[in-house]
Amino acid sequence: MANPLSLISKHRTRLDRQSEADLARLIAAYGNMSQRLKDKVDLLLLELERNPNANIAQMARYKELVQALNSEFVKYNTYLEIELERITAEARSQARLDYAVLIAAALVARGLSVKPAQIVQSGVVPTVMSIGSEAVKRLHELAPLQAQRIIDKLLEGINLGYGYEKLGGMIVNDLGLGLADALRWARTTQMESYRETSRNTMLENGGILDGWTWFAQLDDATCEGCSELHGSFHPARESLNDLTPHIWNCRCVELPHVIGDENPVTGERIE
């Protein structure tokens, strides 16, 4: 059976592929929404170009755009919540399988005849997208903020006398911020659900595991904090999610540690 480091890399590759598919769906849905909104923006800007002295707050096209922005972001975030629930479920399922394989591999390396099916898997644990969680509350609060951000920038540009093309470019850029928000939510939700299910699997197997090793995906996108903690040992009671609560897109995972084994990253003995 493969060693833990090669296994965790294999598992991460599969997780990344699933993430790419998830993000592609979110991007496609957001693109459709953006096009519907852009059509209304174009109609408003054309009317403003014809009537530069008009009171924008009284214009029917402006009112239609404001209504459409609020409506579209509410609908998209409802869709996003459904997607995040599915992403969470997939991440939990994969984590249960992956960590059963990882723990079994560590025991086989000890000379024990153990199969992944014999490892106690994680039970159901609360995740970032659980009903009533802070994450879900924040997601529902996001739509009016996203809509208002675009409205404010539009009004600011008009007051500054920006022309049709510059205003249109501003709106397109501001719409892109909403997509960036959605992609960060998806990636972070996937990883936090994967990690919490992994840790719960370790707790379920506390008789053979005493903790986990911090395993970062070391590349140009890795933050300094995660790079420094790569290879550090932590007791199972500590959650990586709690140690990285504000890091969007964090890709670190917990590598299970069998009692008495060396640290798989540093090779040091863990007392």
Image (spheres, helix red, strand yellow):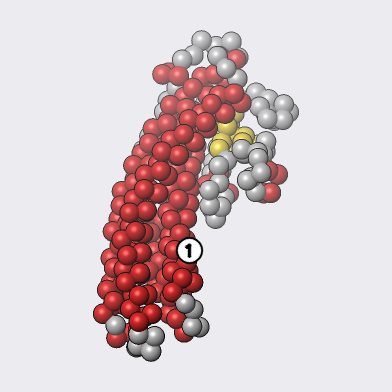
Given residues 75 and 123, the one toward you in this image is 75
Given residues 101 and 184, the one toward you in this image is 184
Give the quarter of the figure containing the N terminus. top right
Give the quarter of the figure containing the C terminus. top right
Given residues 39 and 34, the one toward you in this image is 39
Position of 106 relative to 244 (above/below): above
Give the side of residue 219 with respect to residue 203, left or right. Answer: right
Q: Please state the horizontal and vertical placement of residue 84, each as a whole percent of the image.
A: 37, 47
Amino acid at the residue labelled 1: Asn
Q: Going 55% across and 24% down the picture, which residue do you hit?
A: 7
Position of 211 relative to 60 (above/below): above
Position of 208 relative to 161 (above/below): above
Give the side of residue 148 with respect to residue 107, left or right. Answer: left
Q: Is residue 116 visible?
A: yes
Quarter of the figure with residue 141: bottom left
Q: Secondary structure at mark 1?
A: helix
Q: Going 28% across and 65% down the picture, which residue do you hit?
A: 71
Q: Please state the horizontal and vertical placement of residue 96, each as a whole percent of the image.
A: 43, 30
Q: Please state the horizontal and vertical placement of residue 35, each as a whole percent of the image.
A: 34, 59
Quarter of the figure with residue 178: bottom left
Q: Going 46% across and 15% down the picture, which residue do you hit?
A: 115
Q: Going 33% across and 78% down the picture, which residue do you hit?
A: 47
Q: Is residue 81 visible?
A: no
Q: Please state the horizontal and vertical placement of residue 99, each as a whole percent of the image.
A: 49, 28
The residue that mark 1 highlights is 173
Given residues 120 and 76, the one toward you in this image is 76
Q: How many marks?
A: 1
Quarter of the figure with residue 197: top left
User: Which class describes the residues within 10 Å of circle 1: few (<14), some (14-19), or many (20+)?
Assistant: few
Extreme residue toward the front, this view: 50
